[in-house]
Image (cartoon, rainbow, N blue to C red):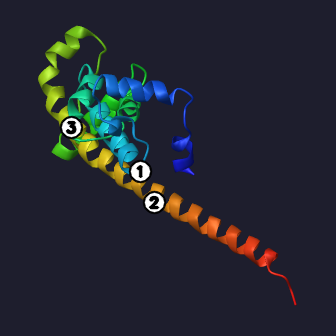
Amino acid sequence: MIRKVFKKKPSGENKIDAFLEKYHLPKAYLSVNRRMITRGVGIGLFWGFIPMPMQMLAVMATTPFIRFNVPIAISMVWLSNPFTMPPMYYMEYLTGNFILGREGIDDIELTMEWFTEHFQDILVPLYTGTAFYSIIVSGIIYVVLNRLWVRSVKTEQEETKKIRKKRASRKKPKI
């Protein structure tokens, strides 16, 4: 099922091939298979959990080292956007405090003065939680997505076999 969604050929595929050839880009960057899609999701989530500017550039900097579906990775980075960043980073901060065994800051104010005063108190727990989510959670999501994809393909193959058996049994003349 998952595979069918990604395997649909867009009408402008020749344009995409021409673009890839013009700039000497590997086709793997747009490849639609289990490995490339799941890697794209994993890498996109990895960079998306890290509180830093220009996360999409970090995804692009990763491409020479690991081959993955770049559009999928970039779309996963977009999960951390101005609306989702505050709850994500707060969750990472709380997780970092939990991992480090620290008490969190109680009287939080949303002012620049407060953040500059408490920057050192926030930084270590935030990036500890960030490391947890970037490495552990994105890794778990990668593995789960990979297994779901394999299960989906196996289920699809089993259904195809059942349909073929049904058709074959209908075609046999009964004597």
Q: Secondary structure at mark 2?
A: helix
Q: Residue furthest bottom?
A: 175
Q: Which residue is mark 3?
A: 103
From the top left corner, tell me how far across and down residue 63 is, in percent. Answer: 24, 34
Q: Quadrant of residue 133?
A: top left
Q: In the rendered view, would you say 152 is above or below 125?
A: below
N-terminal of the pair, mark 2 or mark 3, is: 3
Q: In the rendered view, would you say 150 is above or below 131?
A: below
Taking depth in this image into account, of 121 and 28 the one nearest to the observer is 28
Q: Residue at x 35, y 28 (%)?
A: 20
N-terminal of the pair, mark 3 or mark 1, is: 1
Density class for disc 3 (Cα within 10 Å; few <14, some 14-19, many ≥20) is few
Whether residues under marks 2 and 3 lie with C-beta atoms below 8 angstroms apart, the answer is no
Q: Give the total of numbered labels.
A: 3
| 81 left or right, relative to 13 | left
Density class for disc 2 (Cα within 10 Å; few <14, some 14-19, many ≥20) is some
Q: Which residue is mark 2?
A: 150
| 170 left or right, relative to 141 | right
Whether residues under marks 3 and 1 lie with C-beta atoms below 8 angstroms apart, the answer is no
N-terminal of the pair, mark 1 or mark 2, is: 1
Q: Which residue is mark 1?
A: 34
Density class for disc 1 (Cα within 10 Å; few <14, some 14-19, many ≥20) is many
* Residue 79, visible in the rendered structure: no
Taking depth in this image into account, of 11 and 40 the one nearest to the observer is 11
Whether residues under marks 1 and 2 lie with C-beta atoms below 8 angstroms apart, the answer is yes
Q: Residue at x 77, y 78 (%)?
A: 169
The amino acid sitting under disc 2 is: Val
| 81 left or right, relative to 122 | right
Give the CA separation, mark 3 to mark 1.
42 Å
From the top left corner, tell me how far across and down residue 22 is, in percent. Answer: 32, 22
The amino acid sitting under disc 3 is: Glu
Give the CA separation, mark 1 to mark 2.
8 Å
